Image (cartoon, coloured by chain):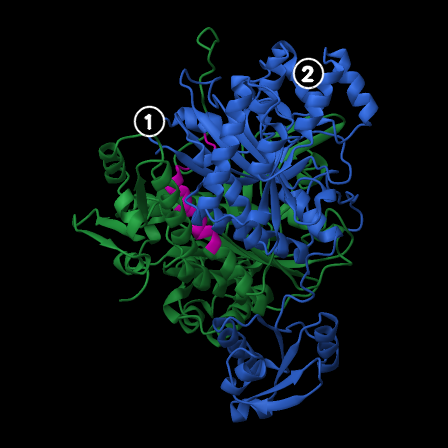
Chain colours: A green, B blue
Amino acid sequence: MTDKKLITPRKLQGFWELMPNEEMVFEDMLDKLKKCFKDNCFVPLDTPNVEYSEILLAKSGGDLDKEIYRFTKGNNDICLRYDLTVPLARFVSMNLNTLDFPFKRFQIGKVYRGERPQKGRFREFYQCDADIISENLPLTYDAECIKLYENCFKALNLEVVVEISNRKILEGFFKSLKLEEKIVELMIIVDKVDKLPKKEIIAMFEENGLKKKDISDLFKILNSKGDIAEIKKQIGEITQDSTFQEGVTELEVISSRLEAMCMKKENFTFNLSIVRGHNYYTGTVFEAFLKDKRNLGAIGGGGRYNNLCGYFIDKNMQGVGMSIGITRLFDILKSENLVKFPSSFIDLAIISFDENTLNYALTLMTKLRAEGVKAEVLNEEKSFKSKMKEANKKEIPFVAICGEDEMKLNKYTIKNMTTGEQKTCSFEELLKLIGKIED
Amino acid sequence: MTDKKLITPRKLQGFWELMPNEEMVFEDMLDKLKKCFKDNCFVPLDTPNVEYSEILLAKSGGDLDKEIYRFTKGNNDICLRYDLTVPLARFVSMNLNTLDFPFKRFQIGKVYRGERPQKGRFREFYQCDADIISENLPLTYDAECIKLYENCFKALNLEVVVEISNRKILEGFFKSLKLEEKIVELMIIVDKVDKLPKKEIIAMFEENGLKKKDISDLFKILNSKGDIAEIKKQIGEITQDSTFQEGVTELEVISSRLEAMCMKKENFTFNLSIVRGHNYYTGTVFEAFLKDKRNLGAIGGGGRYNNLCGYFIDKNMQGVGMSIGITRLFDILKSENLVKFPSSFIDLAIISFDENTLNYALTLMTKLRAEGVKAEVLNEEKSFKSKMKEANKKEIPFVAICGEDEMKLNKYTIKNMTTGEQKTCSFEELLKLIGKIED
């Protein structure tokens, strides 16, 4: 063995990997989210991590994007998926005749982006999406996706505020200025309003044809925040453009639906500066923030889109979806000290001395595990003293000693590692002592 | 849109993808297994699906294996992982100083093999492994991995039989014949005993230097089945070789430990023809079968191996692991009709008629979901009749009708879609009617 050249063990940079105590907490979060999606009548989907490049790059006409992991295997030109939305479109298009619509699916899975790794950016990370797809999708489903944040964050023991807007409002406003051809560029500038100095932003709007009065109106829109009555008061008079008014009406419907769905008033608000980066959103858009921690940035977002399957089939399927940035959320909870990681995976360690008492200890371990106690026999060939030291180091709260004397009496000596108290007792008494059953 | 050339939606052949009703059952299986691993003090691990080729191909000296998905991204030569064991070795080697040992980890994840897809063989599929790693690992841990099958299959509501052997027995036997240099080839032939005609097998053994008497002894070993006493009676006298005797002694210890761990006698047996294909096993080996369905083949297997991390670090880490072929198991349960797939994802459909009653319906939906009832408002713009038809087609067991009359009374009209019975009632009565709370 020593002659052999060793290979330095290393992991690809930017690929998500947690230590076991962190992974336990992360998986617990995923489990709670999955339960929440299921409780809200979403069904699970698990698509391959690899797809034909033709499918994944349909949007860009097959162009190779630097961010994409693309390669060939045999005759196949394939990619690692970079999101869960294109695979959803492919899946819905392939199974149009067998799926029930509205199709409410959630998916939690790894996606791949070859970006330069940096704090909070990963090359392999988890996405967590819930979408509702149908040919004709009333606004109620937009409201359902928003309400879902409240349920999901409650399941995680966190509080959320969802900020809601509707792209039709800004689109209608730009249309009223006869700037419909510049909407894509203008929306990109709007998306930067919070990130760049106001002076720069104003210059960019001016370059794109907005006059002083228009910019002042635009900021009146972008600064509109509050409940639906306040929003209407703030922007109602700006333009009579039909798309603009449709956007406002849609917000009103969403507000009414959220109220009917008992969403807490403090958990949602309207904020007309929300546009979402992606151009495929066509109506409702929203972003989710941790309550009182807006400065940490959005933890998720989503909205309404039309023609999900347009690249694959000749049928217009509408969709609305919400997404939770769980990798990012986990990172935030960790750096803000909002999660507690387990210091020990074991509730109770068992110490035995020889062949006979080892078997006695294993039977105790089996009986305890059947009662939901994470019991583990310290089983390597070590002295009693070093086993006690091991239990201490691993921060195991209880130790059960199984010696000859205990075995003869069909009892166990329990030591509370925090208080140092020690007692010889029966199995039933043991369960009581470690708090597994009531006194 | 109609001018655009559409791309045929298709999925890569041999890549695992289930329909939602199947996926629900599959995820439920995974959840039960995860819980079982955790209850037995295993911790979760989630390594990247992609690793440096140098790491994954360490064993083969970096040779490109046709089965491997290998590609380059930037300057990195990378592969999709083909199992979960090499990533475990890499992880343990990297974190030797921070992990607690024995390190008991489970991992359920996708792996990739570029084989020709065929029935029961996938290019992307799930592996489900539990391993225990330490510098010095007593046989108790081998027994724990075997016992784990009983717990896992019980969690899945299935019964298992684990067949156990120890490679030292055959190795010692071949050593006693001075054939130690041919052990690898001979083990490969042994692994084929069940698959090829006996005549062919005998010829192969003869070619490798076994005499008639040796072959007769060998078959005495390979045909040894039963409990530990029976095994000892059947093969005790064959050779006094020390490795052979060590193998028998280890089986005795395993038997004693399994008894101490309360493993049911009918759930394990010894079968000395079990060798496992992989050459890295060095002692205990086992395979798991569905009880009374041995003909369906092994659903999992595992065993003891030495020097897990030998390619990466200069420290000998021992391991023992068990694996469940969950993709295969799911396929078998499906084809043998041993699983029931849900026909509906919804417990109760709600029908409303206009803006007012829709909001009334949404409140009911929210209240029902909070009680754990999968309630869904049929929300697309359709007539009452077509909504009832939809509920029927989706096999939803109950429908709640929320009309103006019901709203005025703060009541709901419930229809049992199986019996056709209909009743107007309060929320509490509704919960009783659908069996959510006791009468």
- Looking at the rendering, in which quadrant would you find the C terminus of chain A? bottom left
Among the 4 quarters of the image, the one containing residue B210: top right
Q: Which residue in the protein does label 2 denote?
A: B185
Span colored in magenta: A11-31
Q: Amino acid at mark 2?
A: Glu
In this picture, residue A399 sits left or right of residue A312: left
Q: Please report, as a chain letter, where disc 1 is located.
A: B
Q: Residues within 10 Å of mark 2 (few under 14, many from 20)?
A: few
Mark positioned earlier in the residue sequence (1 or 2): 1
**Residue visible at 71% across and 71% down?**
B395
Q: Position of residue A156 (x, y in %)?
A: 40, 57
**Residue visible at 34% across and 34% down?**
B100
**Magenta segment: does it hold A21?**
yes
Which dot marks residue B97? Answer: 1
**Magenta segment: does it hold A232?**
no
In this picture, residue B61 sits left or right of residue B38: right
In the image, residue B430 sits, relative to residue A344, either above or below, namely below
**Residue visible at 49% across and 22% down?**
B306
Q: Position of residue A406 (x, y in %)?
A: 27, 48
